[in-house]
Amino acid sequence: MPDDLRRRLLAEHGEARLVLLGDPRASSVPVMKVLRAELGGDLARTKRTLEQIRAGMFAGTMPEMALFAHRLRAAGVEAEVECPQQPDDAPAGDPAANSRSERPVVLDGSGWWLTDARATVV
């Protein structure tokens, strides 16, 4: 993704985070295989990235994180994407921005934003 588009997406929509669901003691091998396939790099970098994900520190644009979550689910790993906060410059009168900033927003595998009982297609 071009840097200018990435910066614009982050400014408009905020960071999304990749979240691994399920037992944290489960095998890391499937996750690491997906990370190495997507990011390249050596085993040490892959392990650091996995630790960032587990610590809630692996973030990027929603499309980037949705792709990681999709690839992880295809490999049998339960994963989702959360967007816990919107950027500070979100319009104050935008009810969608206000509701998203109060609760985590999750993109499930079907392409729907989920906030409590409401869902909006993206």
Image (spheres, rainbow, N blue to C red):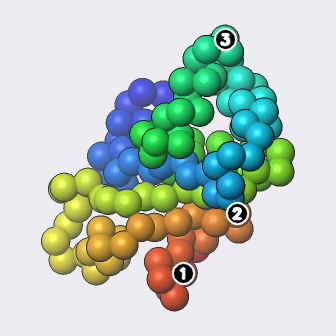
Is 77 on the left-hand or right-hand side of 52?
A: right
Is 15 on the left-hand or right-hand side of 112?
A: left
Q: How far apart, in angstroms, are the residues tagged by discs 1 and 3? A: 39 Å
Check whether the beta carbons of the residues at disc 2 and disc 3 lie within 8 A of each other.
no
Q: Secondary structure at mark 3?
A: loop
Tell me if residue 62 comes above or below residue 32 in the rendering.
below
Is 5 on the left-hand or right-hand side of 99?
A: right
Q: Earlier in the sequence, mark 2 or mark 1?
A: 2
- Residue 65 drawn at (x, y percent): 56, 46
Q: Secondary structure at mark 2?
A: loop
Q: Nearer the viewer, mark 2 or mark 3?
A: 3
Circle number at residue 109? 2
Q: How far apart, in angstroms, are the residues tagged by discs 2 and 1? A: 13 Å
> What residue does disc 1 label?
119
| Most foreground residue, 105 or 42 | 42
The residue most toward the bottom is: 117
| Most foreground residue, 72 or 87 | 72
Badge 3 density bin: few <14, some 14–19, many ≥20, Cα 10 Å: few
Badge 2 density bin: few <14, some 14–19, many ≥20, Cα 10 Å: some
Give me the residue at 83% from left, 51% from top.
76
- Residue 109 drawn at (x, y percent): 70, 63
Q: Secondary structure at mark 1?
A: strand
- Residue 12 drawn at (x, y percent): 32, 52
> What residue does disc 3 label?
42
| Amino acid at pointer 1 | Ala
- Residue 23 drawn at (x, y percent): 68, 55
- Total numbered labels: 3
